[in-house]
Protein backbone atom coordinates (compact mmCIF):
# COMPACT_ATOMS: atom_id res chain seq x y z
CA UNK A 1 0.00 0.00 0.00
CA UNK A 2 1.45 3.39 -0.99
CA UNK A 3 1.26 6.63 1.02
CA UNK A 4 -1.88 7.86 -0.79
CA UNK A 5 -3.76 4.69 0.05
CA UNK A 6 -2.69 4.93 3.69
CA UNK A 7 -3.77 8.58 3.76
CA UNK A 8 -7.19 7.68 2.40
CA UNK A 9 -7.65 4.94 4.99
CA UNK A 10 -6.59 7.32 7.78
CA UNK A 11 -9.21 9.88 6.76
CA UNK A 12 -11.87 7.20 6.71
CA UNK A 13 -10.96 5.91 10.16
CA UNK A 14 -10.25 9.28 11.75
CA UNK A 15 -6.55 8.55 12.34
CA UNK A 16 -3.88 11.19 11.99
CA UNK A 17 -2.06 10.51 8.68
CA UNK A 18 1.70 9.77 8.73
CA UNK A 19 4.17 12.54 7.92
CA UNK A 20 5.40 10.64 4.88
CA UNK A 21 1.99 10.79 3.29
CA UNK A 22 1.77 14.54 3.91
CA UNK A 23 5.21 15.14 2.46
CA UNK A 24 4.31 13.05 -0.55
CA UNK A 25 1.16 15.11 -1.03
CA UNK A 26 3.11 18.36 -0.79
CA UNK A 27 5.45 17.19 -3.48
CA UNK A 28 2.61 16.09 -5.72
CA UNK A 29 0.89 19.42 -5.15
CA UNK A 30 3.76 21.23 -6.82
CA UNK A 31 3.50 19.02 -9.84
CA UNK A 32 1.90 20.73 -12.84
CA UNK A 33 -1.74 19.78 -13.55
CA UNK A 34 -1.38 20.80 -17.29
CA UNK A 35 0.88 19.58 -20.03
CA UNK A 36 4.57 19.79 -19.12
CA UNK A 37 7.22 21.47 -21.27
CA UNK A 38 7.71 18.28 -23.15
CA UNK A 39 4.04 18.45 -24.28
CA UNK A 40 3.10 15.21 -22.52
CA UNK A 41 -0.02 15.11 -20.23
CA UNK A 42 -0.22 13.76 -16.62
CA UNK A 43 -0.36 10.04 -16.38
CA UNK A 44 -3.76 8.42 -15.61
CA UNK A 45 -2.33 6.99 -12.37
CA UNK A 46 -1.40 10.44 -10.99
CA UNK A 47 -4.85 11.88 -11.83
CA UNK A 48 -6.58 8.98 -10.06
CA UNK A 49 -4.41 9.40 -6.95
CA UNK A 50 -5.15 13.13 -6.78
CA UNK A 51 -8.89 12.59 -7.19
CA UNK A 52 -8.96 9.99 -4.41
CA UNK A 53 -7.04 12.34 -2.15
CA UNK A 54 -9.50 15.20 -2.76
CA UNK A 55 -12.50 12.98 -2.07
CA UNK A 56 -10.96 11.65 1.17
CA UNK A 57 -10.03 15.15 2.32
CA UNK A 58 -13.49 16.49 1.56
CA UNK A 59 -15.16 13.68 3.48
CA UNK A 60 -12.84 14.23 6.45
CA UNK A 61 -13.48 18.00 6.48
CA UNK A 62 -17.25 17.44 6.31
CA UNK A 63 -17.12 14.96 9.17
CA UNK A 64 -14.99 17.34 11.25
CA UNK A 65 -17.40 20.22 10.61
CA UNK A 66 -20.36 18.10 11.77
CA UNK A 67 -18.55 17.00 14.91
CA UNK A 68 -17.60 20.59 15.77
CA UNK A 69 -21.17 21.76 15.14
CA UNK A 70 -22.68 19.04 17.38
CA UNK A 71 -20.14 19.71 20.09
CA UNK A 72 -20.94 23.43 20.06
CA UNK A 73 -24.69 22.76 20.18
CA UNK A 74 -24.28 20.31 23.04
CA UNK A 75 -22.27 22.85 25.00
CA UNK A 76 -25.02 25.44 24.51
CA UNK A 77 -27.70 22.99 25.72
CA UNK A 78 -25.66 21.90 28.70
CA UNK A 79 -25.21 25.51 29.71
CA UNK A 80 -29.00 25.85 30.17
CA UNK A 81 -30.86 24.81 33.34
CA UNK A 82 -32.21 21.28 32.90
CA UNK A 83 -34.10 18.64 34.88
CA UNK A 84 -31.86 15.95 36.23
CA UNK A 85 -32.96 12.49 35.03
CA UNK A 86 -33.13 11.46 38.69
CA UNK A 87 -35.54 14.30 39.40
CA UNK A 88 -37.67 13.67 36.30
CA UNK A 89 -37.91 9.87 36.40
CA UNK A 90 -37.14 9.26 40.04
CA UNK A 91 -34.03 7.82 41.60
CA UNK A 92 -33.18 4.32 40.31
CA UNK A 93 -32.95 1.62 42.90
CA UNK A 94 -29.61 1.73 44.69
CA UNK A 95 -28.79 5.31 43.61
CA UNK A 96 -29.40 7.95 46.30
CA UNK A 97 -31.25 11.09 45.14
CA UNK A 98 -29.57 14.46 45.05
CA UNK A 99 -29.76 16.77 48.04
CA UNK A 100 -30.36 13.88 50.37
CA UNK A 101 -30.08 15.99 53.52
CA UNK A 102 -32.86 18.33 52.30
CA UNK A 103 -35.13 15.37 51.54
CA UNK A 104 -34.50 13.89 54.98
CA UNK A 105 -35.43 17.19 56.61
CA UNK A 106 -38.68 17.27 54.63
CA UNK A 107 -39.54 13.70 55.65
CA UNK A 108 -38.82 14.57 59.26
CA UNK A 109 -41.22 17.53 59.07
CA UNK A 110 -43.93 15.34 57.51
CA UNK A 111 -43.49 12.71 60.21
CA UNK A 112 -43.76 15.36 62.92
CA UNK A 113 -46.90 16.77 61.31
CA UNK A 114 -48.50 13.32 61.14
CA UNK A 115 -47.56 12.69 64.76
CA UNK A 116 -49.25 15.93 65.81
CA UNK A 117 -52.46 15.05 63.98
CA UNK A 118 -52.55 11.55 65.44
CA UNK A 119 -52.94 13.06 68.90
CA UNK A 120 -56.20 14.77 67.95
CA UNK A 121 -59.56 13.27 68.90
CA UNK A 122 -60.84 13.30 65.31
CA UNK A 123 -60.46 9.92 63.57
CA UNK A 124 -58.39 9.24 60.50
CA UNK A 125 -60.41 10.19 57.44
CA UNK A 126 -61.82 7.27 55.47
CA UNK A 127 -62.74 7.21 51.77
CA UNK A 128 -63.62 3.92 50.10
CA UNK A 129 -66.01 2.92 47.31
CA UNK A 130 -67.75 -0.41 46.68
CA UNK A 131 -69.96 -1.83 43.93
CA UNK A 132 -72.48 -3.28 46.40
CA UNK A 133 -74.12 -1.93 49.52
CA UNK A 134 -73.36 -5.08 51.50
CA UNK A 135 -69.62 -4.63 50.94
CA UNK A 136 -69.82 -1.01 52.08
CA UNK A 137 -71.63 -2.06 55.27
CA UNK A 138 -69.04 -4.76 56.01
CA UNK A 139 -66.25 -2.23 55.61
CA UNK A 140 -67.97 0.34 57.81
CA UNK A 141 -68.05 -2.14 60.71
CA UNK A 142 -64.33 -1.65 61.12
CA UNK A 143 -64.54 2.12 61.55
CA UNK A 144 -66.32 4.64 63.70
CA UNK A 145 -67.74 8.05 62.90
CA UNK A 146 -68.40 7.21 59.26
CA UNK A 147 -71.51 6.97 57.11
CA UNK A 148 -72.50 5.28 53.87
CA UNK A 149 -73.39 7.21 50.73
CA UNK A 150 -74.40 6.18 47.26
CA UNK A 151 -73.77 7.77 43.88
CA UNK A 152 -74.42 7.18 40.20
CA UNK A 153 -71.66 7.53 37.64
CA UNK A 154 -72.30 10.57 35.45
CA UNK A 155 -71.47 8.76 32.18
CA UNK A 156 -72.59 5.17 32.73
CA UNK A 157 -75.26 5.68 35.41
CA UNK A 158 -73.75 2.78 37.35
CA UNK A 159 -74.58 2.86 41.06
CA UNK A 160 -71.82 2.55 43.63
CA UNK A 161 -71.54 2.96 47.38
CA UNK A 162 -69.11 5.13 49.29
CA UNK A 163 -67.94 5.05 52.91
CA UNK A 164 -66.58 8.22 54.54
CA UNK A 165 -67.12 10.75 57.30
CA UNK A 166 -69.39 13.74 56.80
CA UNK A 167 -66.45 16.12 56.93
CA UNK A 168 -64.32 14.28 54.39
CA UNK A 169 -67.30 13.67 52.12
CA UNK A 170 -68.13 17.38 52.01
CA UNK A 171 -64.50 18.31 51.35
CA UNK A 172 -64.46 16.20 48.20
CA UNK A 173 -68.11 16.63 47.26
CA UNK A 174 -67.88 20.40 46.91
CA UNK A 175 -65.05 20.01 44.37
CA UNK A 176 -67.13 17.92 41.93
CA UNK A 177 -68.66 19.63 38.92
CA UNK A 178 -72.27 20.58 39.60
CA UNK A 179 -73.66 18.55 36.68
CA UNK A 180 -71.64 15.48 37.77
CA UNK A 181 -73.12 15.23 41.27
CA UNK A 182 -75.59 12.35 41.58
CA UNK A 183 -75.14 11.49 45.25
CA UNK A 184 -77.42 10.09 47.95
CA UNK A 185 -77.35 9.53 51.69
CA UNK A 186 -78.01 5.94 52.77
CA UNK A 187 -80.37 5.88 55.76
CA UNK A 188 -79.41 2.60 57.42
CA UNK A 189 -81.97 0.54 59.26
CA UNK A 190 -81.87 1.21 63.00
CA UNK A 191 -80.00 4.49 62.62
CA UNK A 192 -81.58 7.49 64.43
CA UNK A 193 -82.69 10.13 61.97
CA UNK A 194 -84.51 13.41 61.59
CA UNK A 195 -88.03 13.68 60.24
CA UNK A 196 -87.99 14.08 56.45
CA UNK A 197 -90.50 14.41 53.60
CA UNK A 198 -90.41 13.95 49.84
CA UNK A 199 -93.10 16.10 48.21
CA UNK A 200 -93.92 15.95 44.51
CA UNK A 201 -96.63 16.23 41.87
CA UNK A 202 -97.00 16.80 38.15
CA UNK A 203 -97.51 20.46 37.30
CA UNK A 204 -99.12 19.56 33.98
CA UNK A 205 -101.84 17.52 35.67
CA UNK A 206 -102.18 19.94 38.61
CA UNK A 207 -101.76 23.37 37.05
CA UNK A 208 -104.04 24.96 39.64
CA UNK A 209 -101.84 23.95 42.60
CA UNK A 210 -99.55 26.35 44.47
CA UNK A 211 -96.52 24.44 45.77
CA UNK A 212 -95.42 26.98 48.39
CA UNK A 213 -98.91 27.21 49.84
CA UNK A 214 -99.20 23.43 50.01
CA UNK A 215 -95.89 23.15 51.85
CA UNK A 216 -96.92 25.81 54.36
CA UNK A 217 -100.18 23.98 55.14
CA UNK A 218 -98.32 20.70 55.59
CA UNK A 219 -95.78 22.30 57.94
CA UNK A 220 -98.62 23.58 60.11
CA UNK A 221 -100.00 20.05 60.42
CA UNK A 222 -96.54 18.62 61.21
CA UNK A 223 -95.94 21.07 64.05
CA UNK A 224 -99.39 20.38 65.47
CA UNK A 225 -98.74 16.64 65.43
CA UNK A 226 -95.39 17.06 67.22
CA UNK A 227 -97.10 19.11 69.91
CA UNK A 228 -100.00 16.67 70.35
CA UNK A 229 -98.01 13.42 70.33
CA UNK A 230 -94.67 14.39 71.89
CA UNK A 231 -95.38 17.73 73.60
CA UNK A 232 -92.78 19.35 71.35
CA UNK A 233 -93.51 22.95 70.42
CA UNK A 234 -91.79 23.41 67.11
CA UNK A 235 -91.09 26.36 64.85
CA UNK A 236 -90.23 26.93 61.21
CA UNK A 237 -86.58 27.62 62.09
CA UNK A 238 -86.16 23.86 62.49
CA UNK A 239 -87.02 23.20 58.84
CA UNK A 240 -84.56 22.70 55.98
CA UNK A 241 -86.33 23.12 52.64
CA UNK A 242 -84.74 21.97 49.36
CA UNK A 243 -86.21 22.21 45.88
CA UNK A 244 -85.48 20.58 42.51
CA UNK A 245 -88.67 21.51 40.67
CA UNK A 246 -88.81 21.82 36.89
CA UNK A 247 -91.39 23.18 34.46
CA UNK A 248 -93.12 19.80 34.44
CA UNK A 249 -92.73 18.60 38.02
CA UNK A 250 -92.90 20.03 41.53
CA UNK A 251 -90.27 18.36 43.76
CA UNK A 252 -89.28 19.40 47.25
CA UNK A 253 -87.59 17.89 50.32
CA UNK A 254 -88.29 18.89 53.91
CA UNK A 255 -86.05 17.97 56.86
CA UNK A 256 -87.28 18.85 60.36
CA UNK A 257 -84.46 18.96 62.92
CA UNK A 258 -85.92 18.87 66.43
CA UNK A 259 -83.25 20.24 68.84
CA UNK A 260 -81.95 17.55 71.19
CA UNK A 261 -84.18 14.84 69.68
CA UNK A 262 -84.54 12.55 66.66
CA UNK A 263 -86.66 9.59 65.60
CA UNK A 264 -85.41 6.16 66.61
CA UNK A 265 -85.04 5.25 62.93
CA UNK A 266 -86.74 6.01 59.63
CA UNK A 267 -89.33 3.28 60.17
CA UNK A 268 -90.59 5.16 63.23
CA UNK A 269 -90.39 8.40 61.25
CA UNK A 270 -92.46 6.82 58.48
CA UNK A 271 -95.10 5.71 60.97
CA UNK A 272 -95.35 9.28 62.25
CA UNK A 273 -95.73 10.56 58.67
CA UNK A 274 -98.57 8.09 58.14
CA UNK A 275 -100.24 9.53 61.23
CA UNK A 276 -99.97 13.01 59.70
CA UNK A 277 -101.41 11.81 56.40
CA UNK A 278 -104.30 10.16 58.23
CA UNK A 279 -105.04 13.42 60.02
CA UNK A 280 -105.20 15.31 56.75
CA UNK A 281 -107.31 12.65 55.07
CA UNK A 282 -109.83 12.55 57.93
CA UNK A 283 -110.14 16.34 58.06
CA UNK A 284 -110.33 17.11 54.34
CA UNK A 285 -114.13 16.97 54.27
CA UNK A 286 -114.54 19.32 57.20
CA UNK A 287 -111.74 21.73 56.35
CA UNK A 288 -111.42 22.95 52.78
CA UNK A 289 -107.82 24.02 53.35
CA UNK A 290 -106.67 20.39 53.37
CA UNK A 291 -108.24 19.81 49.96
CA UNK A 292 -105.34 21.76 48.50
CA UNK A 293 -102.88 19.02 49.56
CA UNK A 294 -104.46 16.39 47.32
CA UNK A 295 -103.30 16.08 43.74
CA UNK A 296 -104.26 14.22 40.58
CA UNK A 297 -101.97 11.27 40.06
CA UNK A 298 -102.08 11.52 36.26
CA UNK A 299 -104.03 13.10 33.44
CA UNK A 300 -106.59 10.27 33.50
CA UNK A 301 -107.63 11.24 37.02
CA UNK A 302 -107.77 14.99 36.34
CA UNK A 303 -110.66 16.68 38.11
CA UNK A 304 -110.81 14.18 40.97
CA UNK A 305 -108.58 14.13 44.04
CA UNK A 306 -106.63 10.91 44.32
CA UNK A 307 -103.77 11.17 46.78
CA UNK A 308 -101.64 13.44 48.94
CA UNK A 309 -98.54 15.02 47.45
CA UNK A 310 -96.49 13.34 50.22
CA UNK A 311 -94.49 10.33 49.02
CA UNK A 312 -94.89 7.67 51.72
CA UNK A 313 -92.54 5.19 50.01
CA UNK A 314 -89.30 6.86 51.13
CA UNK A 315 -89.30 5.30 54.61
CA UNK A 316 -88.09 1.86 53.61
CA UNK A 317 -85.07 0.23 55.20
CA UNK A 318 -81.61 1.30 54.00
CA UNK A 319 -83.19 4.04 51.92
CA UNK A 320 -81.18 6.29 49.62
CA UNK A 321 -82.20 9.97 49.86
CA UNK A 322 -80.80 12.54 47.46
CA UNK A 323 -78.27 15.03 48.80
CA UNK A 324 -78.45 18.79 48.27
CA UNK A 325 -76.55 20.15 45.24
CA UNK A 326 -77.13 16.83 43.43
CA UNK A 327 -79.33 15.86 40.50
CA UNK A 328 -80.57 12.51 39.32
CA UNK A 329 -78.40 10.82 36.69
CA UNK A 330 -79.47 12.04 33.27
CA UNK A 331 -81.30 15.07 34.74
CA UNK A 332 -80.21 18.68 35.18
CA UNK A 333 -82.40 19.81 38.09
CA UNK A 334 -80.21 20.27 41.18
CA UNK A 335 -81.62 19.95 44.69
CA UNK A 336 -81.05 23.46 46.08
CA UNK A 337 -82.14 25.38 49.20
CA UNK A 338 -85.19 27.56 48.71
CA UNK A 339 -83.88 30.31 50.96
CA UNK A 340 -86.78 29.95 53.37
CA UNK A 341 -86.85 28.84 57.00
CA UNK A 342 -83.59 27.46 58.46
CA UNK A 343 -81.51 27.87 55.28
CA UNK A 344 -82.26 31.57 54.97
CA UNK A 345 -78.97 32.76 56.48
CA UNK A 346 -76.80 29.64 56.27
CA UNK A 347 -73.62 29.13 54.28
CA UNK A 348 -73.43 26.27 51.82
CA UNK A 349 -71.54 23.89 54.11
CA UNK A 350 -73.85 24.49 57.09
CA UNK A 351 -76.85 23.98 54.83
CA UNK A 352 -75.41 20.69 53.59
CA UNK A 353 -74.70 19.40 57.11
CA UNK A 354 -78.16 20.44 58.32
CA UNK A 355 -79.84 18.59 55.45
CA UNK A 356 -78.27 15.21 56.29
CA UNK A 357 -81.00 12.94 57.62
CA UNK A 358 -78.75 10.97 60.00
CA UNK A 359 -76.46 13.79 61.08
CA UNK A 360 -77.52 14.17 64.71
CA UNK A 361 -76.39 16.87 67.10
CA UNK A 362 -74.01 15.75 69.82
CA UNK A 363 -76.56 16.70 72.47
CA UNK A 364 -79.29 14.48 70.99
CA UNK A 365 -80.56 12.77 74.16
CA UNK A 366 -84.13 11.85 73.17
CA UNK A 367 -85.37 9.34 70.61
CA UNK A 368 -88.95 9.68 69.37
CA UNK A 369 -90.81 6.38 69.05
CA UNK A 370 -93.88 5.72 66.90
CA UNK A 371 -94.91 2.07 66.71
CA UNK A 372 -97.89 -0.22 66.84
CA UNK A 373 -99.42 -0.66 70.27
CA UNK A 374 -98.98 -4.18 71.64
CA UNK A 375 -102.62 -4.32 72.72
CA UNK A 376 -104.13 -2.96 69.54
CA UNK A 377 -102.29 -3.30 66.25
CA UNK A 378 -104.44 -0.58 64.67
CA UNK A 379 -103.30 2.00 67.21
CA UNK A 380 -99.99 3.81 67.12
CA UNK A 381 -98.05 4.31 70.30
CA UNK A 382 -96.12 7.57 70.61
CA UNK A 383 -93.34 7.58 73.17
CA UNK A 384 -89.78 8.73 73.82
CA UNK A 385 -86.61 6.89 74.75
CA UNK A 386 -83.27 7.96 76.11
CA UNK A 387 -80.57 7.87 73.47
CA UNK A 388 -78.02 5.41 74.85
CA UNK A 389 -75.51 6.26 72.12
CA UNK A 390 -75.27 10.01 72.34
CA UNK A 391 -71.70 10.02 71.07
CA UNK A 392 -71.75 10.15 67.29
CA UNK A 393 -70.98 6.83 65.59
CA UNK A 394 -70.42 4.73 68.72
CA UNK A 395 -73.05 2.17 67.70
CA UNK A 396 -71.84 1.85 64.13
CA UNK A 397 -71.10 -1.89 64.19
CA UNK A 398 -74.43 -2.86 65.75
CA UNK A 399 -76.36 -0.74 63.26
CA UNK A 400 -74.42 -2.16 60.31
CA UNK A 401 -75.14 -5.72 61.45
CA UNK A 402 -78.85 -4.94 61.54
CA UNK A 403 -78.74 -3.24 58.13
CA UNK A 404 -76.85 -6.13 56.57
CA UNK A 405 -79.43 -8.62 57.84
CA UNK A 406 -82.17 -6.51 56.33
CA UNK A 407 -80.38 -6.34 52.97
CA UNK A 408 -80.23 -10.12 52.88
CA UNK A 409 -83.97 -10.33 53.55
CA UNK A 410 -84.79 -7.76 50.87
CA UNK A 411 -82.58 -9.56 48.35
CA UNK A 412 -84.49 -12.77 48.97
CA UNK A 413 -87.78 -10.90 48.48
CA UNK A 414 -86.44 -9.07 45.42
CA UNK A 415 -87.21 -5.61 46.83
CA UNK A 416 -83.71 -4.12 46.69
CA UNK A 417 -83.00 -1.22 44.33
CA UNK A 418 -85.93 1.19 44.72
CA UNK A 419 -85.78 4.37 42.67
CA UNK A 420 -83.93 7.21 44.35
CA UNK A 421 -86.01 10.29 45.26
Image (cartoon, rainbow, N blue to C red):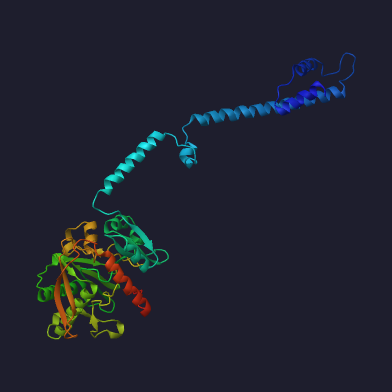
x 30%, y 85%: residue: 300
Q: Can residue 244 be seen in this view?
A: no
Q: Where is residue 401 in the image (x, y as percent from the top left)?
A: 30, 69
Q: In this view, does 377 lie to the left or right of 328?
A: left
Q: Can residue 286 be seen in this view?
A: yes
Please state, as top left, top right, bottom left or bottom right, where the C terminus lies in the image: bottom left
Q: Which of the pair 86/365 is nearer the observer?
A: 365
Quadrant in the rendering for residue 271: bottom left
Residue 280 position (above or below residue 26): below
Q: Position of residue 185 (x, y in %)?
A: 29, 66
Quadrant in the rendering for residue 220: bottom left
Q: Where is residue 157 in the image (x, y as percent from the top left)?
A: 40, 67
x 17%, y 79%: residue: 275
Residue 327 position (above or below residue 96): below
Please state the total of marks drawn on the protein image: 0
Q: Which of the pair 325/227 is nearer the observer?
A: 227
Q: Is residue 209 left or right of residue 22?
A: left
Amino acid sequence: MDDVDRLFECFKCGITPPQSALRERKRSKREPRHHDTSGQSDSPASVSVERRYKNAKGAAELLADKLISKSTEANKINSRKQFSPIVFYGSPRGLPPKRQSRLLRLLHEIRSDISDHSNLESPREVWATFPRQEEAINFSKEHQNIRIFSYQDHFSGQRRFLVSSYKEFWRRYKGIKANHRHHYEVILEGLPCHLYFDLEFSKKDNHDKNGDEMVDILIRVILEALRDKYSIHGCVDWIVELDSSTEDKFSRHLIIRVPGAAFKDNIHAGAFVNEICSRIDNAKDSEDLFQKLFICKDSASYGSVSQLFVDSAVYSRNRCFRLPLSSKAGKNSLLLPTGRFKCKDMCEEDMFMASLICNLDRDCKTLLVCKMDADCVKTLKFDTEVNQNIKYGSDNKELCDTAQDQIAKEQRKGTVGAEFP
